[in-house]
Amino acid sequence: MRVGYARVSSADQNLARQLTVLQNAHVEKIFKEKVSGKNTKREQLQNLLHFIRQNDEVYVSSLDRLGRNSQDLTQIIEIIRQKGAVLNILDLPSFEGIKDRNLKALLTNLVLEIQKYTAENERQKIRERQQQGIQAAKIRGAYSGRKSEYTAHSNNPQKQLIYEKIVMLLKNRAKGQKISITEIARRTGVARNTIYHIQRHL
């Protein structure tokens, strides 16, 4: 069976492009969610990993939809392998013409390892450039921290609504309702750091 996974990082982003790509690949069942890829604790990702069986094929539009760092990607890919399924990344070279499943899996894993290394290396370079930029701005006295996109006066109506929902949940939390920052992040599709930032400025 062909099983797909689609993910965007926040509630105001659109899954349509990924869904179209997966449908064009004749995927039969799609797990989709709007949540950060900072770790593997994602409901629909875990549902997919529990669902797949021997000889299934897992499809994603790109590797970063599965995870954001090499460790998480390795963990996810290993679970898929242990289940006896094959992972297909649609923006990477395809080995559809190869009939031998073992050879196909070997070549796919080789490409994935190269891609994981490249992506991790690029992320590290981006982080280094960001830190260099921040340090330079601090020296100039021009650094004031990153501004949140989620405010009461956001130019994006959707993000303004999400902000208002976060504020409501935080106020309920302050009144004693048992809801964690992690749960607020899950419900709104916003990173925990952003929620902490909003909390500090209430």
Image (spheres, rainbow, N blue to C red):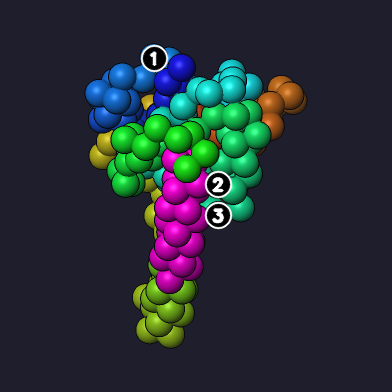
Q: Nearer the viewer, residue 96 or 99?
A: 99
Which one is in front in this view, the residue at disc 1 or the one at disc 2? 1
Can residue 186 be seen at all in this image of the molecule? no
Is residue 150 positioned above or below 33 on the image?
below
Q: Which residue, as the protein is rendered here, is positioned at the far top?
A: 28
Residue at numbered disc 2: 73
Give, as a three-letter code, the residue at label 1.
Glu
Kind of element beneath mark 1: loop
Q: Residues within 10 Å of mark 3 (few under 14, many from 20)?
A: some
Quadrant in which residue 139 is drawn = bottom left
Residue carrying label 1: 28
Q: Amino acid at mark 2?
A: Leu
Tell me the CA gap for discs 1 and 2: 23 Å
Instruction: Say if mark 1 contacts mark 2, CB within 8 Å.
Output: no
Give coordinates of residue 35: x percent, y percent.
49, 33
Instruction: Tell me the residue at 60%/29% (across/down).
Output: 84
**Principal secondary structure, stretch drawn in magenta:** helix
Q: Residues within 10 Å of mark 2 (few under 14, many from 20)?
A: many
Q: Residue at x 65, y 34 (%)?
A: 82
